[in-house]
Image (cartoon, rainbow, N blue to C red):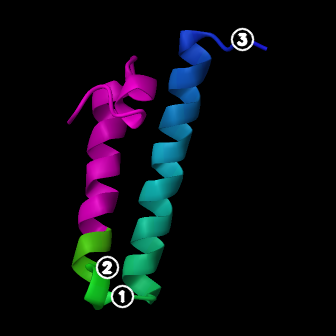
Amino acid sequence: MKYTKQELDEAAIYDLAIDARTSREQAENGPYFPEIGITRESCIAYAEKCERSIERYKDGGAHAFVLGKESL
């Protein structure tokens, strides 16, 4: 099956939304791994990055961003 660009972008937005939600949950409840840089603050920062990306790419380009072909 070949996905359309819109379907790929929608899936990427969905993935970013899941990442944002789970990062916020981890910020609230842990676990934290400060020895590898996973702290409450880093979880919040990652959630905010995901949310900014959703807003920026909601009209297209999310798939390329998630693949690393475009940066925030």
- All told, the count of numbered labels is 3
Alpha carbons under labels 1 and 3: distance apart? 39 Å
Indicate left or right for 41 with 24 as reference.
left
Kind of residue sitting beneath label 3: Lys
Residue indicated by mark 1: 33
Residue holding disc 2: 38
Mark 2 element type: loop
- Disc 3 marks which residue? 2
Percent coordinates x, y for residue 65 in the rendering: 35, 30
Q: Is residue 47 left or right of residue 11?
A: left
Is residue 39 something that shows in the picture? Answer: no
Q: Is residue 9 left or right of residue 59?
A: right
How crowded pointer 2 is (Cα within 10 Å; few <14, some 14-19, many 20+) is rated as some
Task: For label 3, count other residues whose C-alpha is less than 10 Å away and answer few (under 14), some (14-19) or many (20+).
Answer: few
Do the residues under discs 2 and 1 have CB atoms within 8 angstroms? yes
- The numbered disc on residue 68 is none
Image: magenta residue range = 44-72
Residue type, label 2: Ile
Residue at point 34% right, 59% down?
A: 47
Q: Earlier in the sequence, mark 2 or mark 1?
A: 1
Residue at (26% x, 43% y) in the render:
52
Q: Name the image quarter holding the N terminus.
A: top right
Q: Give the percent coordinates (x, y) of residue 56.
A: 27, 30
